[in-house]
Image: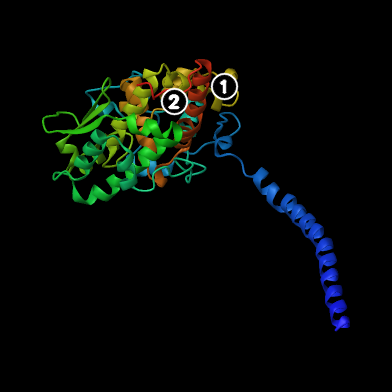
Amino acid sequence: MKKDKKKTKLIYVSTFLILLILFPLISFSLYLLYFVFFIPKLISQPNPSDKNNINLINKIYKPNPFLFQDRGYKGTWAYNKDDKYYRYNQNDYHGTYNNLKKTEQNLTNAFLSTADNKNLSFYKQKIFNSLEELFVFLHPGVRKSLKELINNSNICQKYQNNLKHLILLFYNFVANVLDKKSADNILFAIIINKNLSSFGITTKNNRTIQISQFSLECIYEKTINNEWKRGGKSTNNFFHTLIHELGHIIHYYYEFNNIDIVFHLKEFLKSKIINFNNLDIDIEKIFKSFAFSSYSLVSNYEFIAEGFTYWFLTTDDLKTKAWELWQEYFTNYLIKVKNQHLKNNKVKDSILDII
């Protein structure tokens, strides 16, 4: 009996000593594996924004072939024969390379070249996991207007599910780049206006979007496709009007809080052009070349709304370097601008909470 107890004790002591020796060895081995295999992968994976610099001297860019195939794109919209936007003559929408210097042609091709990374996410995390969860959170007035839009009897039925997806996507974007509270107060209402002559308008002071009843119909897709091919709009998606007007809402919110996002967009673009100060091209020409549709050149407000729409809705085939730059600008660069604004003005709450 005593021998059995001694034997058992010896086993326990031996096991303990073996574990005591093995634990540090295993820990050290895992530590080495971590540094040998895992850390190098982290270091070698560049931030998506690191790849977005444009070298106009040492790199040759090829425009996205789908733009030529699907749209008949002939170059930048900014440089037609009089270097301006023709509101009433749509034959002048298509730009030409004829008036461009070599650097300007290369810049145009750079913006139109195929995106390096088409899988970038609009946001870091899903703040709202479903439309139902979002509706519980939203202000009753906004919730009511969104439900009326989705359930409107005049809306083309095949678009309803996608509309729900885009609404959720937009609010997750706002909640990520601004904050969750701003997602609630960024919009007052979306109203269907039967008498509206244009596709949609946004009222700046009360954050209300009006959409024409015609925009909800299935035939709208054909209309917007025709505009896309003429260059009038930035994407051939049915939801262009809604996202375009939401782009205005984003612009107005920053503007209300004294952040000039057009100025910061130009600064952002300058930072992306390698050796910008040594090139024979100014920021205004870069800015115009960055426009993805003729309609962008009507005003700075339309420029931002069109850029927002192109970024938000474009298909993978049509994603270009310009799309990647809009992606970085909306989801990264503007956040830094906002945070610096808060710091400089010693504002504790979100800049949008005060509206």
Q: In terms of depth relative to the viewer, which is nearer, 306 or 9?
A: 9
Viewer can see residue 147: yes
Q: How many marks?
A: 2
Position of residue 106 in the picture relative to residue 245 (left or right)? right
Is label 1 or label 2 in front?
2
Q: Residues within 10 Å of mark 2 (few under 14, many from 20)?
A: some
Q: Position of residue 355 (x, y in %)?
A: 34, 21
Query: Circle 2 — which element?
Result: loop
Q: Position of residue 76 (x, y in %)?
A: 40, 29
Residue beneath disc 1: 276
Residue beneath disc 2: 350
Q: Position of residue 63 (x, y in %)?
A: 45, 38
Name the disc covering residue 220, or none. none
The image quarter in which residue 252 lies = top left
Question: Which color scheme does this rendered protein use?
Answer: rainbow
At horizontal 26% and vertical 38% (from top left) the residue drawn is 143
Specify the amino acid type for callout 2: Ser
